Image (cartoon, rainbow, N blue to C red):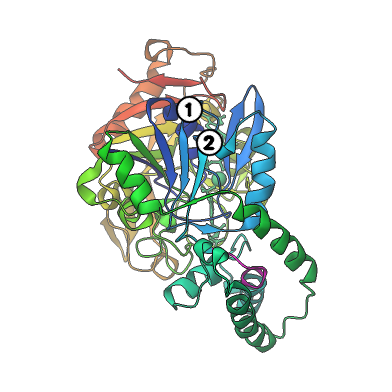
Amino acid sequence: MVDVILGLQWGDEGKGKIVDFFAKDYDLVARFQGGPNAGHTLYVNDQKVVLHQIPSGVFREGIINLIGNGVVLDPVTLKKECDIVSSFGIDLKKSLFISERAHLILPTHRALDKAAELSKGNQKIGSTLKGIGPTYMDKTGRNGIRVGDLLDKNFTTSYIKLRLKHQRLLDNYNFQEDISAWEEEFFEALEFLKQQNIVNGEYFINNQLKAGKRILAEGAQGSMLDIDFGTFPYVTSSSTISAGVCSGLGVAPQHIRDVIGITKAYCTRVGSGPFPTELENETGEELRKIGNEFGATTGRPRRCGWIDLVALNFACMINGVTRIVMTKADVLDTFSELEVCTDYQLNGKESREIPFRMDRQKPVPLYKKFAGWNSSSNAAKSYAGLPDTMKAYIDFINEYLGVKIQYISNGPGREQIIKVV
Ligand code: GDP
Ligand code: IMO
Ligand code: MG
Protein backbone atom coordinates (compact mmCIF):
# COMPACT_ATOMS: atom_id res chain seq x y z
CA MET A 1 0.00 0.00 0.00
CA VAL A 2 0.95 3.61 -0.54
CA ASP A 3 0.25 6.46 1.87
CA VAL A 4 0.81 10.02 0.76
CA ILE A 5 2.03 13.07 2.66
CA LEU A 6 1.50 16.36 0.90
CA GLY A 7 1.07 20.07 1.55
CA LEU A 8 -2.42 21.58 1.61
CA GLN A 9 -1.39 25.23 1.32
CA TRP A 10 1.24 27.08 -0.76
CA GLY A 11 4.18 24.91 0.34
CA ASP A 12 6.50 24.89 3.36
CA GLU A 13 3.87 23.35 5.61
CA GLY A 14 6.53 21.22 7.32
CA LYS A 15 6.38 18.18 5.02
CA GLY A 16 10.06 17.35 5.57
CA LYS A 17 9.71 17.12 9.33
CA ILE A 18 6.51 15.10 9.13
CA VAL A 19 7.83 12.67 6.49
CA ASP A 20 10.95 12.15 8.61
CA PHE A 21 8.73 11.46 11.63
CA PHE A 22 6.41 9.01 9.84
CA ALA A 23 9.12 7.34 7.74
CA LYS A 24 9.99 4.89 10.52
CA ASP A 25 6.66 3.13 9.85
CA TYR A 26 7.44 2.57 6.15
CA ASP A 27 9.88 0.60 3.99
CA LEU A 28 10.24 3.09 1.16
CA VAL A 29 9.84 6.86 0.81
CA ALA A 30 9.38 8.27 -2.70
CA ARG A 31 9.32 11.76 -4.17
CA PHE A 32 6.84 11.89 -7.07
CA GLN A 33 7.08 15.45 -8.43
CA GLY A 34 8.87 18.76 -8.21
CA GLY A 35 12.59 19.26 -7.99
CA PRO A 36 15.08 21.46 -6.15
CA ASN A 37 12.45 24.19 -5.85
CA ALA A 38 11.52 22.16 -2.75
CA GLY A 39 13.26 22.84 0.54
CA HIS A 40 12.33 20.28 3.20
CA THR A 41 13.80 20.98 6.62
CA LEU A 42 14.52 18.29 9.17
CA TYR A 43 16.58 18.01 12.30
CA VAL A 44 18.97 15.10 12.67
CA ASN A 45 20.79 14.89 15.99
CA ASP A 46 19.68 18.50 16.55
CA GLN A 47 21.42 19.50 13.35
CA LYS A 48 19.35 21.25 10.67
CA VAL A 49 19.34 19.72 7.20
CA VAL A 50 17.43 21.06 4.19
CA LEU A 51 16.67 18.49 1.49
CA HIS A 52 15.84 19.61 -2.04
CA GLN A 53 16.02 16.44 -4.12
CA ILE A 54 16.46 13.49 -1.79
CA PRO A 55 13.33 12.13 -0.06
CA SER A 56 13.01 12.95 3.63
CA GLY A 57 13.15 9.29 4.69
CA VAL A 58 16.88 9.22 4.07
CA PHE A 59 17.90 9.62 7.71
CA ARG A 60 15.91 6.60 8.87
CA GLU A 61 17.88 3.38 9.09
CA GLY A 62 16.98 0.66 6.61
CA ILE A 63 14.56 2.74 4.55
CA ILE A 64 14.80 2.92 0.78
CA ASN A 65 14.39 6.32 -0.87
CA LEU A 66 13.26 6.70 -4.46
CA ILE A 67 13.39 9.77 -6.69
CA GLY A 68 10.48 8.99 -8.99
CA ASN A 69 9.94 9.62 -12.68
CA GLY A 70 7.72 12.64 -11.96
CA VAL A 71 10.62 14.52 -10.37
CA VAL A 72 12.91 16.88 -12.28
CA LEU A 73 16.49 16.36 -11.22
CA ASP A 74 19.35 18.83 -11.02
CA PRO A 75 22.52 16.70 -10.81
CA VAL A 76 24.46 19.58 -9.24
CA THR A 77 22.02 19.94 -6.35
CA LEU A 78 21.83 16.17 -5.99
CA LYS A 79 25.59 15.80 -5.73
CA LYS A 80 25.90 18.52 -3.07
CA GLU A 81 23.05 17.02 -1.13
CA CYS A 82 24.45 13.49 -1.31
CA ASP A 83 27.70 14.83 0.17
CA ILE A 84 25.83 16.38 3.10
CA VAL A 85 23.73 13.28 3.74
CA SER A 86 26.77 10.99 3.48
CA SER A 87 28.56 13.10 6.09
CA PHE A 88 25.96 11.79 8.58
CA GLY A 89 27.22 8.28 7.90
CA ILE A 90 24.34 7.35 5.59
CA ASP A 91 25.26 4.85 2.87
CA LEU A 92 23.38 6.16 -0.17
CA LYS A 93 24.49 3.20 -2.26
CA LYS A 94 22.08 1.19 -0.14
CA SER A 95 19.32 3.72 0.39
CA LEU A 96 18.93 6.01 -2.63
CA PHE A 97 17.45 4.98 -5.99
CA ILE A 98 16.68 7.21 -8.97
CA SER A 99 14.20 6.57 -11.76
CA GLU A 100 15.69 6.53 -15.23
CA ARG A 101 12.60 8.40 -16.41
CA ALA A 102 13.16 11.50 -14.26
CA HIS A 103 13.93 14.53 -16.44
CA LEU A 104 17.23 16.35 -16.09
CA ILE A 105 17.43 20.06 -15.31
CA LEU A 106 20.13 21.53 -17.55
CA PRO A 107 22.03 24.76 -16.85
CA THR A 108 20.14 26.34 -19.76
CA HIS A 109 16.83 25.45 -18.07
CA ARG A 110 17.93 27.54 -15.12
CA ALA A 111 18.96 30.36 -17.44
CA LEU A 112 15.61 30.18 -19.24
CA ASP A 113 13.76 30.30 -15.91
CA LYS A 114 15.64 33.48 -15.03
CA ALA A 115 15.17 35.04 -18.48
CA ALA A 116 11.43 34.25 -18.52
CA GLU A 117 10.93 35.72 -15.05
CA LEU A 118 12.83 38.89 -15.95
CA SER A 119 10.72 39.33 -19.06
CA LYS A 120 7.52 39.16 -17.00
CA GLY A 121 8.36 42.29 -15.01
CA ASN A 122 5.88 42.84 -12.19
CA GLN A 123 3.82 39.85 -13.35
CA LYS A 124 6.63 37.45 -12.46
CA ILE A 125 5.69 34.17 -10.77
CA GLY A 126 8.38 34.55 -8.15
CA SER A 127 9.93 31.27 -9.30
CA THR A 128 12.76 29.77 -7.27
CA LEU A 129 14.86 30.05 -10.48
CA LYS A 130 15.84 26.40 -10.26
CA GLY A 131 14.77 25.71 -13.85
CA ILE A 132 11.57 23.89 -12.92
CA GLY A 133 9.16 25.46 -15.45
CA PRO A 134 11.47 25.15 -18.49
CA THR A 135 12.33 21.52 -17.63
CA TYR A 136 8.67 20.48 -17.36
CA MET A 137 8.03 22.42 -20.60
CA ASP A 138 10.64 20.29 -22.33
CA LYS A 139 9.07 17.18 -20.82
CA THR A 140 5.56 17.92 -22.10
CA GLY A 141 7.06 19.40 -25.28
CA ARG A 142 8.83 16.05 -25.79
CA ASN A 143 12.30 17.54 -25.96
CA GLY A 144 13.66 16.76 -22.51
CA ILE A 145 16.60 14.58 -21.55
CA ARG A 146 16.10 11.94 -18.89
CA VAL A 147 18.39 10.31 -16.35
CA GLY A 148 18.40 7.07 -18.36
CA ASP A 149 19.70 8.93 -21.43
CA LEU A 150 22.94 9.52 -19.57
CA LEU A 151 23.90 5.93 -20.20
CA ASP A 152 23.29 6.28 -23.95
CA LYS A 153 26.22 6.83 -26.30
CA ASN A 154 24.35 9.66 -28.03
CA PHE A 155 23.91 11.65 -24.84
CA THR A 156 26.30 14.44 -25.84
CA THR A 157 24.59 14.89 -29.22
CA SER A 158 21.17 15.14 -27.54
CA TYR A 159 22.57 17.60 -25.03
CA ILE A 160 24.11 19.83 -27.72
CA LYS A 161 20.88 19.77 -29.75
CA LEU A 162 18.75 20.83 -26.80
CA ARG A 163 21.29 23.38 -25.67
CA LEU A 164 21.22 24.99 -29.13
CA LYS A 165 17.46 25.22 -29.01
CA HIS A 166 17.69 26.84 -25.57
CA GLN A 167 20.35 29.26 -26.80
CA ARG A 168 17.99 30.52 -29.52
CA LEU A 169 15.32 31.11 -26.88
CA LEU A 170 17.83 32.83 -24.60
CA ASP A 171 18.93 35.04 -27.48
CA ASN A 172 15.29 35.99 -27.98
CA TYR A 173 15.15 37.07 -24.36
CA ASN A 174 18.44 38.89 -24.90
CA PHE A 175 19.91 36.90 -21.99
CA GLN A 176 23.61 37.71 -21.79
CA GLU A 177 24.85 35.95 -18.65
CA ASP A 178 27.79 33.60 -18.99
CA ILE A 179 26.72 30.15 -17.76
CA SER A 180 29.93 28.27 -18.57
CA ALA A 181 30.68 27.79 -14.86
CA TRP A 182 27.23 26.21 -14.39
CA GLU A 183 27.93 23.87 -17.29
CA GLU A 184 31.25 22.84 -15.86
CA GLU A 185 29.74 21.78 -12.53
CA PHE A 186 26.83 20.18 -14.40
CA PHE A 187 29.11 17.84 -16.37
CA GLU A 188 31.06 17.00 -13.24
CA ALA A 189 27.80 16.17 -11.44
CA LEU A 190 26.65 13.98 -14.35
CA GLU A 191 29.64 11.72 -13.77
CA PHE A 192 28.56 11.44 -10.15
CA LEU A 193 24.94 10.76 -11.13
CA LYS A 194 26.00 7.93 -13.45
CA GLN A 195 27.45 6.08 -10.47
CA GLN A 196 24.21 6.21 -8.46
CA ASN A 197 21.51 3.53 -8.40
CA ILE A 198 19.60 4.33 -11.58
CA VAL A 199 16.59 2.05 -11.82
CA ASN A 200 13.42 1.42 -13.72
CA GLY A 201 11.34 3.16 -11.06
CA GLU A 202 7.95 1.74 -11.97
CA TYR A 203 9.08 -1.90 -11.75
CA PHE A 204 11.17 -1.09 -8.71
CA ILE A 205 8.21 0.32 -6.77
CA ASN A 206 5.67 -2.23 -8.02
CA ASN A 207 7.97 -5.08 -7.01
CA GLN A 208 8.12 -3.53 -3.55
CA LEU A 209 4.33 -3.35 -3.50
CA LYS A 210 4.06 -7.00 -4.53
CA ALA A 211 6.39 -7.92 -1.70
CA GLY A 212 3.98 -6.22 0.72
CA LYS A 213 6.24 -3.26 1.48
CA ARG A 214 4.80 -0.06 2.90
CA ILE A 215 5.41 3.01 0.78
CA LEU A 216 5.20 6.67 1.70
CA ALA A 217 4.91 9.17 -1.17
CA GLU A 218 6.32 12.59 -0.26
CA GLY A 219 4.84 15.63 -1.94
CA ALA A 220 6.71 18.82 -2.65
CA GLN A 221 5.24 22.32 -2.89
CA GLY A 222 1.57 22.49 -1.92
CA SER A 223 -1.90 21.88 -3.34
CA MET A 224 -2.48 25.58 -4.04
CA LEU A 225 0.64 25.53 -6.23
CA ASP A 226 -0.66 22.61 -8.33
CA ILE A 227 -0.41 23.17 -12.08
CA ASP A 228 -4.14 22.43 -12.60
CA PHE A 229 -5.85 23.36 -9.34
CA GLY A 230 -3.54 25.97 -7.86
CA THR A 231 -3.74 29.73 -8.25
CA PHE A 232 -2.72 29.59 -11.92
CA PRO A 233 -0.55 31.09 -13.36
CA TYR A 234 1.10 31.67 -9.96
CA VAL A 235 1.83 27.98 -9.48
CA THR A 236 4.61 25.48 -10.01
CA SER A 237 4.77 23.23 -13.09
CA SER A 238 3.88 19.82 -11.65
CA SER A 239 0.94 17.91 -10.19
CA THR A 240 1.44 18.45 -6.50
CA ILE A 241 -1.81 16.72 -5.52
CA SER A 242 -2.47 13.06 -4.69
CA ALA A 243 -3.32 12.27 -8.34
CA GLY A 244 0.32 13.13 -9.15
CA VAL A 245 1.45 10.09 -7.13
CA CYS A 246 0.17 7.64 -9.76
CA SER A 247 1.79 9.33 -12.76
CA GLY A 248 4.87 10.43 -10.81
CA LEU A 249 5.74 6.93 -9.59
CA GLY A 250 3.91 4.51 -11.85
CA VAL A 251 1.61 3.11 -9.17
CA ALA A 252 -2.06 2.37 -9.80
CA PRO A 253 -4.71 4.31 -7.81
CA GLN A 254 -6.01 1.28 -5.92
CA HIS A 255 -2.70 1.04 -4.06
CA ILE A 256 -3.22 4.42 -2.42
CA ARG A 257 -4.60 4.22 1.10
CA ASP A 258 -4.19 7.30 3.30
CA VAL A 259 -3.67 10.84 2.07
CA ILE A 260 -2.15 12.79 4.93
CA GLY A 261 -2.48 16.52 4.39
CA ILE A 262 -0.17 18.98 6.15
CA THR A 263 -1.28 22.48 7.07
CA LYS A 264 0.28 25.11 9.23
CA ALA A 265 -1.88 26.47 12.05
CA TYR A 266 -1.76 29.70 10.01
CA CYS A 267 -0.74 30.22 6.40
CA THR A 268 2.27 31.34 4.36
CA ARG A 269 3.19 31.84 0.75
CA VAL A 270 6.52 32.63 -0.90
CA GLY A 271 6.58 34.19 -4.36
CA SER A 272 3.86 36.10 -6.17
CA GLY A 273 0.14 35.41 -6.53
CA PRO A 274 -3.11 35.68 -4.64
CA PHE A 275 -3.22 35.00 -0.90
CA PRO A 276 -6.58 36.20 0.47
CA THR A 277 -5.73 35.92 4.17
CA GLU A 278 -2.33 37.60 3.90
CA LEU A 279 -1.60 40.06 6.72
CA GLU A 280 0.45 42.97 5.47
CA ASN A 281 0.68 44.45 8.94
CA GLU A 282 2.32 43.96 12.33
CA THR A 283 0.52 40.68 12.96
CA GLY A 284 1.93 39.32 9.69
CA GLU A 285 5.38 40.54 10.72
CA GLU A 286 5.04 38.80 14.05
CA LEU A 287 4.05 35.50 12.42
CA ARG A 288 7.10 35.78 10.16
CA LYS A 289 9.40 36.57 13.07
CA ILE A 290 8.13 33.94 15.51
CA GLY A 291 7.65 31.29 12.81
CA ASN A 292 11.03 32.13 11.25
CA GLU A 293 9.23 32.31 7.93
CA PHE A 294 12.04 32.61 5.43
CA GLY A 295 12.26 30.31 2.39
CA ALA A 296 14.30 27.13 2.93
CA THR A 297 15.42 27.22 -0.72
CA THR A 298 15.76 30.91 -1.54
CA GLY A 299 15.86 32.62 1.89
CA ARG A 300 13.10 35.00 0.77
CA PRO A 301 10.73 36.26 3.50
CA ARG A 302 7.48 34.31 3.38
CA ARG A 303 4.22 36.19 3.22
CA CYS A 304 2.14 35.33 6.32
CA GLY A 305 -1.54 35.32 7.20
CA TRP A 306 -4.36 33.52 9.01
CA ILE A 307 -5.43 29.98 8.19
CA ASP A 308 -7.81 29.84 5.20
CA LEU A 309 -10.45 27.12 5.57
CA VAL A 310 -12.01 27.81 2.17
CA ALA A 311 -8.68 26.97 0.53
CA LEU A 312 -8.02 24.06 2.92
CA ASN A 313 -11.44 22.58 2.22
CA PHE A 314 -10.72 22.78 -1.51
CA ALA A 315 -7.35 21.07 -0.99
CA CYS A 316 -8.98 18.29 1.08
CA MET A 317 -11.53 17.74 -1.71
CA ILE A 318 -9.02 17.64 -4.58
CA ASN A 319 -6.64 15.32 -2.72
CA GLY A 320 -9.11 13.08 -0.92
CA VAL A 321 -7.38 13.88 2.38
CA THR A 322 -8.06 11.26 5.05
CA ARG A 323 -6.03 12.72 7.93
CA ILE A 324 -4.47 16.07 8.73
CA VAL A 325 -1.29 17.04 10.52
CA MET A 326 -1.25 20.61 11.78
CA THR A 327 2.23 22.08 12.14
CA LYS A 328 3.65 25.16 13.85
CA ALA A 329 0.84 25.42 16.40
CA ASP A 330 3.48 26.72 18.83
CA VAL A 331 4.05 29.79 16.63
CA LEU A 332 0.61 31.05 17.72
CA ASP A 333 1.47 30.72 21.44
CA THR A 334 1.76 34.46 22.11
CA PHE A 335 -1.17 35.75 20.07
CA SER A 336 -4.06 36.92 22.25
CA GLU A 337 -6.59 36.58 19.43
CA LEU A 338 -6.60 34.36 16.35
CA GLU A 339 -8.66 34.54 13.20
CA VAL A 340 -9.84 31.76 10.93
CA CYS A 341 -11.14 32.45 7.43
CA THR A 342 -14.42 30.56 7.00
CA ASP A 343 -15.88 32.24 3.89
CA TYR A 344 -14.97 34.46 0.98
CA GLN A 345 -16.97 37.45 -0.06
CA LEU A 346 -17.06 37.34 -3.85
CA ASN A 347 -18.99 39.83 -5.98
CA GLY A 348 -20.97 40.87 -2.90
CA LYS A 349 -21.96 37.28 -2.05
CA GLU A 350 -20.62 34.85 0.54
CA SER A 351 -18.95 31.79 -0.94
CA ARG A 352 -17.02 28.73 0.16
CA GLU A 353 -15.58 28.04 -3.27
CA ILE A 354 -12.20 28.89 -4.78
CA PRO A 355 -12.89 31.14 -7.78
CA PHE A 356 -11.34 30.58 -11.24
CA ARG A 357 -8.84 33.46 -10.95
CA MET A 358 -8.33 34.66 -7.40
CA ASP A 359 -5.89 37.29 -8.65
CA ARG A 360 -8.65 38.90 -10.71
CA GLN A 361 -11.72 38.15 -8.60
CA LYS A 362 -10.00 39.10 -5.34
CA PRO A 363 -12.12 37.37 -2.70
CA VAL A 364 -12.42 39.19 0.62
CA PRO A 365 -11.87 36.78 3.54
CA LEU A 366 -14.50 36.63 6.27
CA TYR A 367 -13.22 35.56 9.67
CA LYS A 368 -14.28 33.87 12.86
CA LYS A 369 -12.30 35.03 15.89
CA PHE A 370 -10.80 32.71 18.48
CA ALA A 371 -9.17 33.39 21.81
CA GLY A 372 -5.45 32.69 21.73
CA TRP A 373 -3.93 30.24 24.23
CA ASN A 374 -1.32 32.64 25.53
CA SER A 375 0.80 29.86 26.87
CA SER A 376 3.81 27.92 25.80
CA SER A 377 2.74 24.78 23.94
CA ASN A 378 6.07 23.50 22.70
CA ALA A 379 6.88 21.66 25.90
CA ALA A 380 3.59 19.69 25.80
CA LYS A 381 4.04 15.96 25.38
CA SER A 382 0.44 14.82 25.11
CA TYR A 383 -2.93 16.05 23.88
CA ALA A 384 -4.10 16.43 27.48
CA GLY A 385 -1.24 18.87 28.05
CA LEU A 386 -2.41 21.26 25.34
CA PRO A 387 -4.41 24.35 26.30
CA ASP A 388 -8.23 24.14 26.00
CA THR A 389 -8.25 27.20 23.74
CA MET A 390 -6.01 25.34 21.30
CA LYS A 391 -8.32 22.34 21.46
CA ALA A 392 -11.29 24.59 20.60
CA TYR A 393 -9.36 25.94 17.61
CA ILE A 394 -8.55 22.40 16.44
CA ASP A 395 -12.10 21.14 16.99
CA PHE A 396 -13.55 23.94 14.90
CA ILE A 397 -11.19 23.21 12.00
CA ASN A 398 -11.89 19.46 12.27
CA GLU A 399 -15.59 20.05 12.06
CA TYR A 400 -15.39 22.56 9.22
CA LEU A 401 -13.21 20.30 7.06
CA GLY A 402 -14.85 17.03 8.04
CA VAL A 403 -11.36 15.51 8.26
CA LYS A 404 -9.64 14.73 11.52
CA ILE A 405 -6.51 16.55 12.62
CA GLN A 406 -4.56 13.55 13.83
CA TYR A 407 -1.33 15.17 14.92
CA ILE A 408 -0.26 18.59 16.14
CA SER A 409 3.35 19.56 15.60
CA ASN A 410 4.53 21.90 18.34
CA GLY A 411 8.14 22.59 17.42
CA PRO A 412 10.66 21.88 14.66
CA GLY A 413 12.31 18.96 16.52
CA ARG A 414 11.82 15.39 15.37
CA GLU A 415 9.84 14.36 18.43
CA GLN A 416 7.87 17.58 18.90
CA ILE A 417 4.59 16.14 17.73
CA ILE A 418 1.44 15.19 19.61
CA LYS A 419 -1.22 12.67 18.69
CA VAL A 420 -4.75 14.02 18.98
CA VAL A 421 -7.01 11.65 20.87
P1 GDP B 1 8.43 21.86 3.86
O1 GDP B 1 8.92 22.47 2.60
O2 GDP B 1 6.96 21.62 3.83
O3 GDP B 1 9.20 20.64 4.27
O4 GDP B 1 8.66 22.95 5.00
P2 GDP B 1 9.98 23.86 5.20
O5 GDP B 1 11.07 23.03 5.72
O6 GDP B 1 10.24 24.67 3.98
O7 GDP B 1 9.45 24.90 6.27
C1 GDP B 1 8.95 24.50 7.50
C2 GDP B 1 9.77 25.18 8.61
O8 GDP B 1 9.08 25.09 9.82
C3 GDP B 1 11.12 24.54 8.83
O9 GDP B 1 12.03 25.52 9.24
C4 GDP B 1 10.84 23.56 9.99
O10 GDP B 1 11.99 23.29 10.76
C5 GDP B 1 9.83 24.33 10.77
N1 GDP B 1 8.84 23.52 11.50
C6 GDP B 1 8.22 22.39 11.12
N2 GDP B 1 7.29 22.04 12.04
C7 GDP B 1 7.31 22.97 13.00
C8 GDP B 1 6.57 23.19 14.19
O11 GDP B 1 5.67 22.46 14.55
N3 GDP B 1 6.89 24.31 14.93
C9 GDP B 1 7.86 25.17 14.56
N4 GDP B 1 8.10 26.22 15.34
N5 GDP B 1 8.59 24.99 13.44
C10 GDP B 1 8.30 23.92 12.66
P1 IMO C 1 8.38 23.04 -0.68
O1 IMO C 1 8.45 21.62 -1.22
C1 IMO C 1 7.03 27.13 -1.23
C2 IMO C 1 6.75 28.61 -5.34
C3 IMO C 1 7.74 29.68 -5.76
C4 IMO C 1 6.92 30.39 -6.81
C5 IMO C 1 6.15 29.25 -7.48
C6 IMO C 1 6.80 28.73 -8.74
O2 IMO C 1 9.58 23.42 0.10
O3 IMO C 1 7.09 23.28 0.01
P2 IMO C 1 8.97 27.29 -9.29
O4 IMO C 1 10.38 27.46 -8.84
O5 IMO C 1 8.34 26.01 -8.91
O6 IMO C 1 8.78 27.60 -10.74
O7 IMO C 1 8.17 28.47 -8.51
O8 IMO C 1 6.09 28.21 -6.51
N1 IMO C 1 7.39 27.39 -4.78
C7 IMO C 1 7.37 27.07 -3.48
N2 IMO C 1 6.90 27.74 -2.41
N3 IMO C 1 7.58 25.91 -1.05
C8 IMO C 1 8.04 25.21 -2.12
O9 IMO C 1 8.46 23.94 -2.01
C9 IMO C 1 7.99 25.80 -3.40
N4 IMO C 1 8.36 25.41 -4.63
C10 IMO C 1 7.98 26.40 -5.47
O10 IMO C 1 8.09 30.50 -4.69
O11 IMO C 1 5.98 31.23 -6.20
MG1 MG D 1 9.97 24.17 1.95
Give left or right: position of 349 versus 189: left
In what quadrant of the picture does the N terminus appear? top left
> Is 107 part of what is drawn in magenta?
yes
Point 58% across, 54% down: residue? 36
Relative height, residue 31 to residue 234 (above, below): above
Residue at disc 1, secondary structure: loop
Q: Residue furthest left?
A: 254
In this rendering, which labeled residue sits more in front, label 2 or label 1?
Answer: 2
Question: From where the camera sits, is residue 247 visible?
Answer: yes
Q: Quadrant of residue 188?
A: bottom right
Disc 2 to disc 1, C-alpha distance: 8 Å
Residue at 64%, 36% in the rendered image: 85
| Residues in magenta, as a range | 104-110
User: Residue 262 or 304: which is nearer the viewer?
Assistant: 262
Given the image, on which type of amino acid does mark 2 rest? Lys
For the C terminus, the quadrant is top left
* Front position in the image: 312 or 152: 152
**Where ligand 2 lies, by quadrant?**
bottom right
- Residue named by callout 1: 62
**Residue 352 vertical position relative to residue 218 in the rendered view, above or below:** below
Q: Please, what secondary structure does the residue beneath circle 2 have? A: helix
Residue 62 x/y as whole percent: 48, 27
User: In the displayed structure, does residue 243 sit left or right of residue 288?
Assistant: left
Q: Residues within 10 Å of mark 1 (few under 14, many from 20)?
A: some
User: Disc 2 marks which residue?
Assistant: 94
